Image: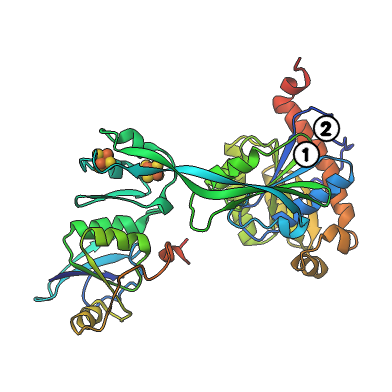
């Protein structure tokens, strides 16, 4: 299964980024082989709508689930429209997030976990 | 060094029927005391017999009402257009999503999603849709309230929580401007809502603090005003002896410092109780009376210089 973890760096041992739309990087992980592909967040510097733009990107990359800290309502709707599931939790590294996910320890989101524009705080 | 030489002040008296003199109060950042200055000036002007309209254009957090304490008499809703999709016509070509730079309309897979909360109401998606699948729907984005208090006509805009686009609400507030002296309380910063507020004002007062941060934001605001070709001056709030950075900057850029309000604990305390400092703190009223006279002088002159002929000589 292909999942994507919001991250501050490019590999399994990078610290996760709890923000979705404003995460620094996305680490796509094959949960069977633990192979990774890292990508910059194409929407990291968008002035508005970063969550939606990054959700669109994640859908287009073919991820089946997003593992992150928080997911706003717009990004959530966009991910849901693309058939991508959202799991939230707070772990230290990308690897920890994947392990928690495989161990069933992340919470599956069925609606937005924060209000819109969470990631802008302290960033703007 | 600021030029504090008082020219002979010629109070601006608006004869009936004369277009308003619009003076806007702005600041490069929040918390400089812009609203304190604007509201106290409004009261001093009203006491001098001026017909004053106060327009609170800081529509995300309007706080002028905390000081003027107006009784509101009317309220109207402000709407703006958001896209409405007719999926029967849409062939999911993706053009709308490519166009919208706010991702307020986004094509994901075979679905077209709209996010009204992200929409800036430009109408572009409706224009680019090749099959006419998008029409406009009115979305409430805020309101304009009107009332009066302390001898001042008071109008404020209120952006709905979660709405992004302040400019349409601000322009609705500005429609309420009347003859006489119009005081505009602008949002802090230098973004679109600020420009929407300041546009077509006759004169701008930039309220700043004598700190490095204050100076940095002041310089950005000055750039903006010069780009907009608006006449302006600077007012230093919480002025302290020895803190001369702002004064030095203004001297260097030939910017007039119209007044300084001293850093005084009594002012801060009175302000935090929602009081008018001209009434509660000794010596403040005279500062504002001086400010009002000088403002009438410079703002009136600036207007006569820029658009005066138009107004004076109109048949
Ligand atoms: S531009 Fe029109 S036809 Fe194309 S995806 Fe958007 S709504 Fe559908
Ligand atoms: S009106 Fe403008 S901002 Fe709103 S969805 Fe259409 S293109 Fe985007």
Q: Residue furthest top?
A: B315
Q: Residue B85 got which mark? A: none
Q: CA distance from mark 2 to mark 1?
A: 8 Å
Picture coordinates of residue B176 (x, y %)?
A: 68, 39
Q: Residue B14 got which mark? A: 2
Say if residue A43 shows up in the picture: no
- Disc nearer the start of the sequence (2/1): 2
Q: Residue at x 74, y 68 (%)?
A: B272
Label 1 residue SS: strand
Please state if B78 lies on the left or on the right of A101 as rendered. Answer: right
In this figure, what is the number of numbered marks?
2
- Judging depth in this view, the residue of B257 and B196 nearest the camera is B196
Picture coordinates of residue B84 (x, y %)?
A: 36, 43
- Judging depth in this view, the residue of B274 and B6 nearest the camera is B274
Is ligand 2 closer than 8 angstroms to the Cβ of mark 2? no
Q: Residue at x 35, y 59 (%)?
A: A74
Q: Residue at x 89, y 47 (%)?
A: B47
Q: Residue at x 40, y 38 (%)?
A: B123
Ligand 2 falls in quadrant: top left
Categorize mark 1 by other alpha carbons within 10 Å: few (<14), some (14-19), many (20+).
many
Please state if B162 lies on the left or on the right of B252 as rendered. Answer: left
Please state if A44 lies on the left or on the right of A115 as rendered. Answer: left
Categorize mark 2 by other alpha carbons within 10 Å: few (<14), some (14-19), many (20+).
some
Identify the image quadrant of residue B198: top right
Identify the image quadrant of residue A82: bottom left
Please state if B282 lies on the left or on the right of B160 as rendered. Answer: right
Q: Are marks 2 and 1 in contact (CB under 8 Å)?
A: yes
* Mark 1 lies on residue: B181
Q: Are marks 2 and 1 on the same chain?
A: yes
Identify the image quadrant of residue B62: bottom right
Which quadrant of the figure contains the C terminus of chain B? Answer: top right
Label 2 residue SS: loop
């Amino acid at each position: 299964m292909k999942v994507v973890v919001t991250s501050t760096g490019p590999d399994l041992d990078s610290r996760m980024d709890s923000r979705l739309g404003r995460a620094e990087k996305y680490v796509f992980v094959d949960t069977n082989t633990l192979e990774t592909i890292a990508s910059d967040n194409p929407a990291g510097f968008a002035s508005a709508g970063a969550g939606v733009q990054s959700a669109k990107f994640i859908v287009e990359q073919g991820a089946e689930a997003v593992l992150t800290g928080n997911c706003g309502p717009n990004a959530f709707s966009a991910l849901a429209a693309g058939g991508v599931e959202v799991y939230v939790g707070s772990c230290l590294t990308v690897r920890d997030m994947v392990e928690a996910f495989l161990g069933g320890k992340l919470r599956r989101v069925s609606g937005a976990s924060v209000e819109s524009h969470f990631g802008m705080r302290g960033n703007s | 060094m600021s030029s504090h030489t008082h020219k002979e002040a010629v109070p601006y008296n608006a004869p009936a029927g004369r277009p308003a003199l619009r003076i806007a109060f702005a600041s490069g950042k929040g918390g400089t005391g812009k609203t304190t200055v604007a509201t106290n000036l409004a009261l001093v002007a009203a006491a001098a017999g001026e017909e004053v309209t106060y327009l609170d254009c800081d529509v995300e957090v309007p706080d002028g009402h905390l000081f003027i304490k107006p009784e509101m008499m009317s309220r109207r809703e402000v709407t703006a257009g958001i896209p409405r999709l007719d999926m029967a016509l849409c062939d999911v070509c993706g053009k709308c999503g490519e166009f919208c730079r706010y991702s307020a309309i986004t094509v994901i897979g075979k679905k077209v999603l709209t996010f009204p909360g992200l929409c800036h109401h430009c109408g572009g998606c409706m224009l680019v849709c090749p099959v006419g699948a998008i029409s406009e729907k009115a979305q409430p984005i805020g309101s304009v309230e009107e009332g009066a208090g302390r001898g001042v006509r008071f109008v404020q805009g209120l952006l709905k929580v979660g709405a992004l686009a302040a400019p349409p609400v601000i322009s609705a507030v500005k429609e309420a401007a009347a003859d006489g002296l119009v005081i505009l309380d602008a949002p802090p910063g230098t973004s679109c809502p600020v420009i929407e507020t300041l546009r077509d004002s006759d004169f701008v007062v930039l309220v700043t603090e004598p700190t490095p941060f204050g100076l940095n934001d002041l310089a950005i605001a000055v750039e903006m005003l010069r780009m907009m070709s608006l006449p302006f001056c600077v007012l230093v709030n919480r002025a302290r002896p020895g803190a001369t950075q702002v004064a030095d900057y203004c001297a260097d850029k030939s910017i007039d410092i119209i007044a300084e309000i001293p850093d005084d604990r009594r002012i801060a305390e009175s302000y935090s109780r929602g009081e008018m400092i001209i009434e509660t703190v000794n010596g403040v009223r005279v500062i504002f009376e001086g400010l009002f006279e000088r403002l009438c002088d410079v703002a009136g002159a600036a207007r006569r210089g820029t658009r005066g002929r138009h107004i004076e000589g109109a048949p």
